Amino acid sequence: MHDLVIRDAKIVDGSGALAIYGDVAVDNGKIVQVNGEKAASGKREINANGALLTPGWVDVHTHYDGQATWDPYLSPSSWHGVTTAVMGNCGVGFAPVKRHMREWLIQLMEGVEDIPNAALSEGIDWQWETFPEYMNALEKMPRVMDIGCQVPHGALRPYVMGENGVESNDATAAEIDAMRRITREALQAGALGFSTSRTLIHKGADGKHVPGTFARLEEVFGIGRALGDAQRGVFQMTSNHVGMDQETVWMRKLAEETGQPVAFNVQQIDTHPELWKTLIAQIEDAGRAGVPLYGAFCGRPVGLLFSWGGTFHPFIAHPSYQPLRTLSAADRYKALQDPAVRAKLLSEQPHGLDDYTKMKAVAFHKMFRLGTGNSTPDYEPDPSSSAAAIAARTGRQPNDIAYDWMLEDEGRAIIYFPVFNYSYEKLSHTYELLQHPRTMLSLGDGGAHCGYICDASLPTFMLTHWTRDRTRGEKLPLELIVQRQTSSTAGIYGLHDRGLIKPGYIADFNLIDYDKLTLHSPHFVADLPAGGRRIVQEASGYLATIKAGRTIFEKGQATGEMPGKLVRGPQAL
């Protein structure tokens, strides 16, 4: 008798193969049987009644480095079927760290990833200095899903170099050797990779760029060679978007030298909307030579969420708005309805913003009404529905329309601003990237950007939009989309024991009512430590999420099971 049998499921196994109907049997947390015939009896049985069965999603780009120390559910990712999450991306994290640098790392994470300082300060119980000690602390905590860590450049550099590392001074040969040794030791202890950031967008709360942003290639290669030393791990790099066709030259050399995957962000940006084609051509050329260079991309626009209660909105830098920032949500909503306040705000322009941030405040052609409550958000909006387009048709000002949109639902409504990956005003380039064998689905950013991004819902969106609901272009096969967020992501990170519904693999599953799978609108909650606020997003239609053969969610409700663990290093069958 098996531990668990799932009967009569539509099995999409994560390999890209066509779906089959049948039973899946599990013993000791591993899959032992998958076929189109009836399995033997199980101590516990689930009758799928033809529902969709997929592997659990493997999300390789999250920022739960702090949240993982207090939240066993790693929400909202677990709400969307994620059973394995990789943290420590973009060069930011909390280990290694000396005691006097703890608060500085919190400020760095606050600035780069928009996670409230108070939540991190109250929530993190610092039980570590070194990276192996950080992993040991994570390992002690029960959790619903598996997690993996990467060594962040932003923590490593000041740990070795002190204030010189914070100030972006050049590392000495001895300091580079020390960073290489520490990274190698972390990889040998189970880190899944090393991450760095070279984008000028990423700054800490003090306005300084992430340590390593301007590091010389001698330093980058010195640390990167630790992956070759250990013969394991991914080198994850958050790119500067512009000039990336030059950066790929050294990244290819690093991947070739170490033999380990190098993954960098491929974002479509409005100022250089065709650059992604050049980057993909370079990735393809590396692939033909057998070099493991990959382009990481998001399966929908990287969308900023503007609202009165969020981190950013079109009026955030208007002089008349400043007294309203400290009001309660109810008092602010009341004030914003005052015709005099409204007229004053609409008459002003933003002040004190850099060019990039000001662009976000006034680019009304990229602002769309996302919806409220249980309405289904549209992440591929028609340009005719932008605030600017509606204003042109109606004779109103676009900021007037944006003002009204955010006042809906008692001031809780959200405007959607696709900042990256929407230069064509549709997802045609994403459609191509999703079918490319040298790309990696990524950038969901679970746990981060609490006040203006919630892309951790990406796994659910991938199914609903790309395989079922898309109207502004071609759809993609369900089997491909399942593969892209299971075996494809797991394989690049060396997690070869998951991502497939085949005998011998970990029994991680999502059982889904595919026809009823629905992504709801994002909204704010105040559930972080110290009352910190964040945007979350729910889904309905997940009948069950199963981790290592144990049901962790059933019809959207947590069961209390905690089978998750820390993943240490590459995993084989």
Image: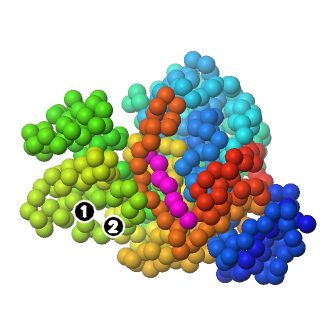
Q: Which mark is residue 381?
A: 2
Q: Amino acid at mark 1?
A: Ser
> Is residue 537 shown in magenta?
yes
Around disc 2, counting alpha carbons within 10 Å, would you say few (fewer than 14), some (14 to 19), or many (20 or more)? many
Q: In the image, 277: left or right of 366?
A: right
Q: Residue at the spot x=47%, y=31% of the render?
A: 531
The quadrant the C terminus occupies is bottom right
Left or right of residue 127, residue 458 in this image: left
Q: Which residues are magenta?
A: 535-541
Q: Is residue 359 above or below residue 142?
A: below
**Residue 435 occupies which quadrant of the picture?**
bottom right
Q: Are marks 1 and 2 in contact (CB under 8 Å)?
A: yes
Packing grade of label 1 (10 A; few <14, some 14-19, many >=20) is many
Instruction: Give the secondary structure at mark 1.
Output: loop
Secondary structure found at label 2: loop
Label disc, if present, on residue 386 of the rendered structure: 1
Question: How far from the left and from the top, in percent, is residue 357?
Answer: 29, 43
